[in-house]
Structures are given as structure tokens and as C-alpha cells.
Amino acid sequence: MKLSIAELPGDGIGPEVVQQAVKAVEAVCSSFGHEAAFTFGYMGAAAIDHSGDPYPEETHRLCLDSDAVLFGAVGDPKYDNDPNAKVRPEQGLLAIRKRLGLYANLRPVETFKPLADKSPLKTELVEGADFLCVRELTGGMYFGEKGRKDGGDTAYDTCVYSRFEVERILRLAFGYARRRRGHLTVVDKANVMETSRLWRAVAKGMEPEYSDVTVDYMFVDNAAMQLIRCPKFFDVIVTENTFGDILTDEASCISGSMGLLASASVGEHTSLFEPIHGSYPQAAGKNIANPVASILSAAMMFEYSFGLMEEGKAIREAVAASIEAGVVTEDLGGNRSTSEVGDWIADKIIKI
Ligand code: IPM
Ligand code: MN
């Protein structure tokens, strides 16, 4: 199979970790007889420096013309500390999500047995936890009307959802629940927010169509607590954009490191695969960042975009073997560099 992949490394540690994912993809291609062509695109702060636009038209066209997008991270401290900046790297990520219609962000949370003691939570709580967060990605406060009034002294971000947006993400989540362990948790704040009441009403209306799925409803504050109190309770979580952003950072503690969690953003056009972590500027260029989240995003790419399940599995097995062998970066208590871990995993894929 010929795979044309848009490679958008972005900022900070993005380029280093994506490079390791590329190695894994190339190893899989050589083992399974596929051909991958990567084309670079500017994104984030790197794109602002290059052309002034965090998501240039050229990159957008590249994404539309590709079979999948492998994305690193965006963000640069020089913008974080400047509240008056007119253009920000993160706008590039929001733009690509919106323009490719990537309304669903799938964030699986799994645990690796040898890492159970790396979680700040008790081993017996996290061991065996395995759930999927389905985060809505193109609506809510991220995209609602925002602005300033009263001469700049009042600011607002509006949370807006239409029935259409809610129903399509819920349908996806119900489908995953049906194919997994049949348990869906709808996370909202329906005791306070009108958008959440719409979510709840739409979900309730869909329940009869999915009578094989057990549905429960949880307020987001309670969900934040249950996630670390009892992570094994969850199978599929579905929630709106902002809640999903926050809960999945929290959920990364269950696995032991932010550097382990991969994600797929899917929707109307080309799907995008990205680690859930950010650009981690303190580590940029130091060859110390954990590349596993990016490598596992490549596994998701094989599975979701190309339907190549065995290829995805080969990557997953190689990652598990690297962890088993203690070939891990410092966030997991190891002493291997980013590229060493990437090389080891690519080599293992060839041997599998
Ligand atoms: C994520 C990130 C982004 C988000 C930022 C970089 C805009 O935190 O993918 O989770 O908030 O969605
Ligand atoms: Mn986030």
C-alpha cells in the first residue's frame, strides 16, 4: 500500500518525537511491504516565524491531499507570556481541527504493567485501567464567540453546541462503547450549564438505539475525582471540548506519564494523529522527551486511516517490549534519549 503522510512536527519537542514516529512508520513499511511518502508542512510558532500564519494555506492543502497527518505539538513560551500577542501558535492547531472538520478526538488511556509504580496513584488502583476518552474537538468554548467589552475590562468565551454537533460525537462514542465493554459515561455539567443539558437530552434520546450499552451521566467535577479514585470504572467517556482537554491531562497520570498518551482526531477530512502532550519547550532540542506518545499515534494512524491492524499491533508490541526492557526516557525513570528509544522501537518492529 502507498501511504502519503503529511508530517507537521510543529514546535518544541514536536520535531524530535515525530522523527521517532517516522522511524517506526518506516520500519513497519519495510516489514509489511508498504511505501510511505512524508511531506513536511509548517505549523504553529515555526509557521508564524516562516510566514506569519500558524496554519498556512499551503499546509492546509497538503493535509487535504494526504491520507493522514502526523502532527507533533505547537506552542512557544514567548507567546504564552504575551497576553497581547495578535497571533498564537495554538491558533494553528484550532484552525487545522476546524478546517479538516476533526470533530472527534479519541484519547485511549491504557496502563503498562511495568510502569504501574510510575503512576502517582496506588498500583492496585491503576493496574488494568483501560478506557477511551472521546473529546469533542471543534465546538464549545474553544470556538464560540469570544471577546472583550467595557473597554477591555470584561472578557468572555461563549460555550455553544448545536444538536447536530452533539449527536454526531455521541453516536461515535456509543459505537465505541458497543465495540468495547458496553459502558458509556457522558460527562457534563448539566446542573449548571445549558449546553450540558442539551448534551444530556440528546444522549438520553439516543439510549434506546443502543440498548446494549449501559449509559451513565456524571458531572465533570465528580468525573475528575472518580478518574483518579477509581479509573477502572470507565470504559468510554464522552465529553465536550474543554472538559475533555482537562480530564485527559489528568488521565495521563494513570498511565504514569504524559509522554505515553496518543490520540487520533477524526472527522470529515484527513485524520490527524498527535500525542496529547504539548510542546514541552524546556526539553526542546535536548533529546530527552518521551517519543512513545508520538509513536503510538503512528500506530493509531495505521489502524484508523489505513485499516492496517497488524501493522498497528507491531508498533504497539514494540513499544510494550521497550518498556518491558527498561528502554525508557527520564520521565519514566530511565536514562535513554529520545532517539535511542525511537531507534530501539524501530529495530524491534523489524524483528517482530
Ligand atoms: C491539546 C492541547 C491543545 C488543546 C492546545 C495546544 C490548543 O492542549 O491538544 O490537548 O487545548 O486542545
Ligand atoms: Mn490539552
Image: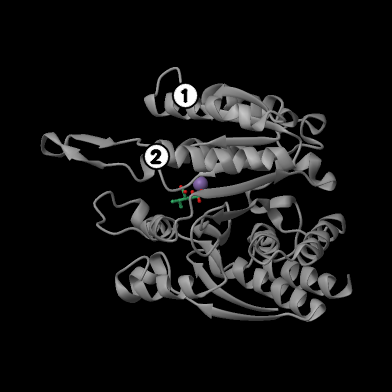
Where does the image place residue 296, in percent across and percent down from the top left?
69, 59
Identity, as a three-letter code, of the amino acid under mark 1: Lys
Identity, as a three-letter code, of the amino acid under mark 2: Gly
Residue 249 seen by the camera: no
Relative to 92, 117 lies left or right: right
Q: Quadrant of residue 177?
A: top right
- Is 136 located above or below residue 284 in the figure? above
Q: Which mark is residue 131?
A: none
Where does the image place residue 10, in percent across and percent down from the top left?
48, 67
Q: Which residue is mark 1?
A: 189
Measured Cα–Cα span from mark 2 to mark 1: 13 Å
Relative to 257, 278 lies left or right: left
Residue that lies at the very extreme toward the top in this rendered image: 191
Relative to 262, 324 lies left or right: right
Q: Are marks 2 and 1 in contact (CB under 8 Å)?
A: no
Where, quadrant-wise, is the C terminus in this rendering?
bottom right
Residue that lies at the very extreme toward the left in this rendered image: 151
- Is 96 located above or below residue 203 in the figure? below
Who is closer to the viewer here, 117 or 206?
206
State the SS at label 2.
helix
Residue located 63% across and 67% down the image: 287
Residue that lies at the very extreme toward the front in this rendered image: 209
